[in-house]
Amino acid sequence: MKRIWFYVIVCLQALFLILMSMSYYTMDEWGESIRLKTAPVDPRDPFYGDYVTLSYEVELVPTDKWNISSDIASGEKVYLLLEPGENDLYTLVQATVEKPDVSGAEVVLPARLDWHDPQRGVYMVDIGMERYFIEEGTGRQYEQNREDLIVEVIVAPWGQKKIDSVTTAE
């Protein structure tokens, strides 16, 4: 009997790992692709190579788009409602604590509150996609090319997200 439970537990662990890795790849099939505007900073990590640190425009939420009445602590979950704007770049509609209903081409991105600056009237949130690893030796190209970057993000219906590509703004 103990042997059967051992095999059941091993199979459940294997199944969990398979499903976890499959969820990343099924995002390409069922997820929605959105484009976000960002500005790069190019550091280098000796263990991982070149990567681009990204700061998204939608992460800086003005007070008039902050639809949260109660005070929330840093690190708490918020939802960003985005809609397509000029040049198919998604822009912020509102930030809420409850997941909003979407209509049409709107998309919801989960995020976490970082900080609030009452003097500037902004809230800073983190959508959790600040690093994008690039091909070795191409970091200088991003550093020298200080134009804004366009990041294509795939957002799955279950809330998972990943960076698909980073390109220079047209």
Image (spheres, helix red, strand yellow):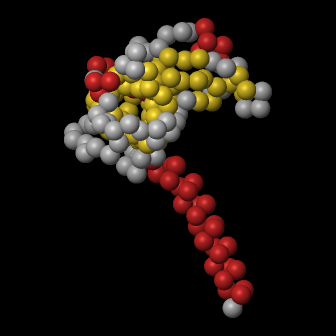
What residue sits 45% from the left and 31% below the top? 125
Residue lying at the far right of the rendered structure: 46
Task: Indicate the quadrant where residue 132 lies.
Answer: top right
What residue sits 71% from the left and 22% below the top? 44
Does 7 sit above or below residue 95? Answer: below
What residue sits 50% from the left and 23% below the top? 55
Residue 148, horizontal then vertical, whole percent: 47, 14
What residue sits 72% from the left and 32% below the top? 48
Does 102 sit above or below residue 2? Answer: above
Q: Can residue 73 be seen in this view?
A: yes
- In which quadrant is the N terminus drawn? bottom right
Q: In screen coordinates, is 63 left or right of 47?
A: left
Residue 63, horizontal then vertical, whole percent: 32, 24
Residue 137, horizontal then vertical, whole percent: 70, 19
Q: In screen coordinates, is 103 left or right of 127?
A: left
Task: Indicate the quadrant where residue 11 lies.
Answer: bottom right
Does 160 sit above or below residue 130? Answer: below
Residue lying at the far left of the rendered structure: 103
Q: Is residue 164 visible?
A: no
